[in-house]
Image: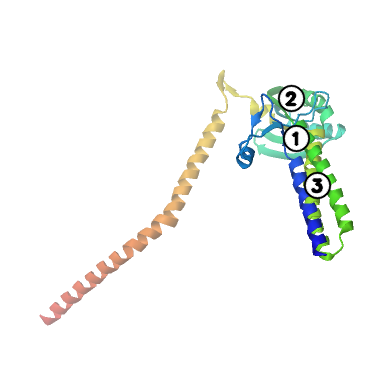
Amino acid sequence: MKKKLWVVIGIAVLVLIASGCQSMAYREIPAEPGMIPMPPQSELSGGTDYYRPEEPASAGTERMVIRTASLDLIVPDTEEAITAIEELASNLGGYVVSLNTYQYEQGVQGSITIRIPAESFNTALEQLKALATTVRSESVGGQDVTDEYVDLESRLRHLRAVEEQLLGFLEKAEDTEATLAVYEQLQQVQGEIEQVTGRMQYLENQVALATITISLTPDALAQPLEVGGWNLPGTFRHALEALLNTLEVIVKVAIYLVIVVLPTLIILLAPIVAIVLLVRWLVRRRRRARVKAE
C-alpha cells in the first residue's frame, strides 16, 4: 500500500513540474543561430542550453487594446456639462466612475471620469469636445495587452490539463494518504486557475470599456480679468492665495511657539527662577534679622 502511495505522489509531483515548465513564458529548444544562451540552465547542466520567447500573437489575431483619454475643457456652465456627460455615458451604454466638483465665487469647477464601450470611444470624444468652448488639452493613449492575454490562455490550457490528470489520479487513489496528497496538489492547481481566469476577466473588462477623464472649467474662471485695457490673468486670485499662505505660516509658527518653545523655556527656566527667588528671600530674611538685632 505504501508503495502505491509513493507512486501516486510521484506521478502528481511530476505532472505539476511538467505543467510549470509548460506555463513558463519561455521554452527550451535546440541551439540555432541568433538564439540567446540561458546561463542558469548551462550552469546546472554543464553545457549550453538556449531559449527563445514564445511566438507573440500573429498578425491575424485581433488586438486587445486598453484605451484611455483625458480632456481639459472650458465650458459655458460646469453643472450643465456634467449633466450632459452623464447622459452621454448612459446613452452609449457606459457609466460614471467618479465625479468631483469644487465651488468658487466665479463658478463651479469639476472633474468626471466615465467608462464607455470601446467601439464608441471616438464618438464619445467628439461629443465631449462639442460641449466645450475651448479644448485646452487632449491626451489619448492605449495599452496593447494581446500578448499577455494569449500567454494567459496558454497557461490556462496547461493548468486545465493538469487538473484533469489530477482528478484522474484522485479517482484511482486507494488509501487516505494518497487521496490527501493528490487533493492538496489539486487545490494548488485550481487556485492558479482562479488567478489566471481572474486576470483574463480583468483584461477583457478593461479592453471592452474605455476610460475617459474630463476636467471642466467654466468660462468665468478661465477668462483673465481685464480692467482699463490691462490684462490681469488671475492676479487677484494669486494675491489672495499668497495672503492665505502667509497667514497659514504665521498660524503654524504661533502653534509651534505655544506647543514646543514655550513649554521648553518653562522647563529650562523654572529651576533658575526658583533659585533666584530663594536667594532673594534669604537676603531679605537676613536684613530683617539685622534690623531687629540693632
Image spot of residue 294 (x, y percent):
10, 80
Q: In this figure, which residue is indicated by the disc labeled 2?
A: 132
Instruction: Give the residue type that dot 3 points to.
Output: Ile
The local crowd at label 1, few if under 14, some if 14 to 19, many if 20 or more residues have their Cα within 10 Å, is some
Image spot of residue 153 (x, y percent):
81, 38
Q: Nearer the viewer, residue 45 or 107?
A: 45
Instruction: Give the residue type that dot 2 points to.
Output: Ala
Image spot of residue 260 (x, y percent):
42, 56
The image shows residue 264, relative to residue 248, as above or below, that is below
Q: Which of marks 2 and 3 is nearer the N terminus?
A: 2
The quadrant holding residue 287 is bottom left
Give the residue displayed 57% in from the left and 25% down from the top: 233
Q: Which mark is residue 193?
A: 3
The local crowd at label 2, few if under 14, some if 14 to 19, many if 20 or more residues have their Cα within 10 Å, is many
- Kindly state the secondary structure of the residue where label 3 is placed: helix
Q: Earlier in the sequence, mark 1 or mark 3?
A: 1
Q: In this figure, which residue is indicated by the disc labeled 1?
A: 148
Quadrant where the N terminus sits is bottom right
